[in-house]
Image (cartoon, grey):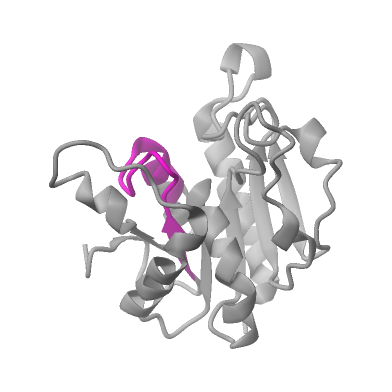
Amino acid sequence: MQNGILINGPDDAEFTILLAHGAGGAMDSPSMTAAAEALAAIGFRVARFEFAYMAARRTSEGRKPPPRADKLIAEYGAAIERLGVSGPLIIGGKSMGGRVASMIADDLFAKGKIAGLICLGYPFHPPGKPEELRTKHLETLKTPALIVQGTRDVFGTRQEVQSYKMSNKIDLVWLEDGDHDLRPRKKISGFSLADHLASMAAAVKTWASPLAP
């Protein structure tokens, strides 16, 4: 760990990917670790960090709820500065972490600080509240972006998301029967979580290739 940041993958990778965690899982949660390891296995340098409210859960009693996503923007920016990459940087995260990254992406992209954005299980709406969309800024996004989503994600199923208006800069990859952690039911879909993580990583690699300077 360096400056509170977990690193997987080679130091000389063409791209570094900075990932933030979701609202309820730490940077070293099983789903975050599995995603980072899958990306590192195909050559990405993957960095993970924690927002302060999550880090506080490791040292204090009780569970502080996450702040609103917009209140975490400054912390994401600070993590980018701490990471201090010199090569192409892709920002993103799981669920809420990806949402926060998407809220700052255009400003950073316009300044040449990032090459793209990836979201693993984007929280398009709260579970059971499809009317409360979190997509307004995605309609005009100018940053090259990739969203990897399970088809039965309760934060946005394939059927729901196909009706949303989104920027043509956003590519969507659907993982059959995947939930919010991209996990499928093998008996139903025929796929394992390892299958889906490998597909996710391969999709990121294909998508990122044209972003190299």
| Residue 112, percent from left and from top | 59, 87
| Residue 80, percent from left and from top | 40, 74
Above or below, 79 against 30 in this view is below
Residue positioned 62% across, 85% down in the render:
213
The answer to whether 98 appears left or right of 138 in the picture is: left
Above or below, 176 against 33 in this view is above
**Residue 163 is one of the magenta-drawn residues:** no
Residue positioned 30% across, 52% down in the render:
53
The one of 102 and 13 positioned closer to us in this rendering: 102
**Residue 19 is one of the magenta-drawn residues:** yes
| Residue 28, percent from left and from top | 30, 45
The answer to whether 50 appears left or right of 89 in the picture is: left
| Residue 23, percent from left and from top | 43, 43
Residue segment shown in magenta = 16-36
Residue positioned 66% across, 75% down in the render:
211
Please identify the residue farthest to the top as the structure is shown.
Answer: 187
The one of 146 and 136 positioned closer to us in this rendering: 136
**Image quarter (top left, top right, bottom left or bottom right) of the N terminus:** bottom left
The one of 28 and 61 positioned closer to us in this rendering: 61
